[in-house]
Amino acid sequence: MNKQLNIPKKTGAVSKFLETHFRHFNAASLVDAAKGYEKHLLKGGKMMITLAGAMSTAELGRSLAEMIRQNKVHLICCTGANLEEDLFNLVAHHHYKRIPNYRDLSPEDELELLDLGYNRVTDTCIPEAHAMRKVEKAIQQLWKRALENEESYFPHQYFFQLLREDLLIHSYQIDERDSWLLAACKKNIPIIVPGWEDSTIGNMFAAYCLAEECSTKVMRGGIEYMMFLADWYPKNSIKEGVGMFQIGGGIAGDFPICVVPMLYQDMELENVKCWGYFCQISDSTTSYGSYSGAVPNEKITWGKLQIDTPRFVIESDATIVAPLIFAHILDW
């Protein structure tokens, strides 16, 4: 099989370490998932990555951006938080505050952080003035321009406009190559952001609309995102299909995977391919009806996966697992 697909022998230090030592249980699943990802691409398939949790604040862009540059990713579905937090990190990284002993914080400590203008994400505090408000000031110009021109865009398209028009370029505080959003923008990778309203910038937009300083007419939403995906998916699944690499659970994964049953059940289209590869990284316990903890086999009953779809579950911390899988694929 390896010879037929011409899978190159791994020479990178991290890749060789993984293949030597990650041989059982979740460690073995990690390597198997990485090899399955690579096989899917080598057969001509495409791959979607979904981002839940706080992957951008965890600086996943350090590895994900290179995956995008090397054409290992063809579509991204993420939460509004992950969309904006990669940009926050790009323009305000030097002002971030890391708290290694975050487990020991008292409620009074948390309130002090708020009073100092910090919003905590586990061990990392995002500075509101240098991150949120800086982006707000720039993106507000784009919303007002769209309103004046009677235009409407998706949330991620406004972020792409910020980057392409260099509205924040003088504020960059990290290596541009470590931003997955900037890499996606340069590659023009489609991004889907369901439930974008549940984000800091989304809340700001709602506030502007409530204050009648802007209008909801300038923002395209979830239904149109699903319509875009319904058009994109069949066109990109002609050969070996589209794979789904799901980091975390929730709407980032639940939203896009449903496009398959929608196409053939609700639209009654024929020859709709199921997802050609599926991997889920999650530390959610498989119990109590948790979608994030649902095993891939369950998705067969929903018409999302087939019985022969390569399926992987890695029950571990995505901040550890995802960079290692990307490193194996990139042969680092």
Image (cartoon, rainbow, N blue to C red):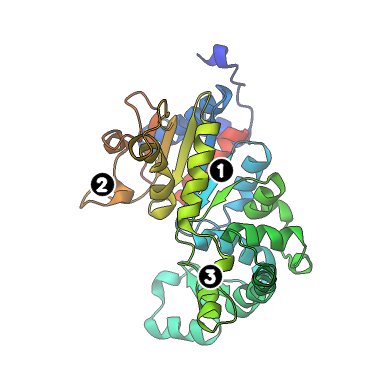
**Quarter where residue 133 is shown:** bottom right
Q: Disc 3 to disc 1, how far (Cα)?
A: 26 Å
Left or right for 108, reference 329: left
Which residue is denoted by mark 3 in the rendering? 216
Which numbered circle lies on residue 75? 1
- SS class, disc 2: loop
Residue toward you, 263 or 198 = 263
Residue 98 is at least partly visible in this image: no
Q: Disc 1 to disc 2, how far (Cα)?
A: 27 Å
Dot placed on the residue nearer the N-terminal end, 1 or 2: 1
Dot placed on the residue nearer the N-terminal end, 3 or 2: 3
Query: Going 62% across and 21% down the picture, which residue do you hit?
Result: 8
| Mark in the foreground, 1 or 2 | 1
Which residue is denoted by mark 2 in the rendering? 286
What amino acid is found at the position of numbered circle 1 in the picture? Leu
User: Residue placed farthest to the front in the image?
Assistant: 150
User: Residue placed farthest to the left in the image?
Assistant: 288
Percent across and percent down for residue 194 are: 46, 56
**Does 323 appear above or below 134?**
above
**Dot 2, how many residues are within 10 Å of its Cα: few (below 14), some (14-19), or many (20+)?**
some
The tally of labels here is 3
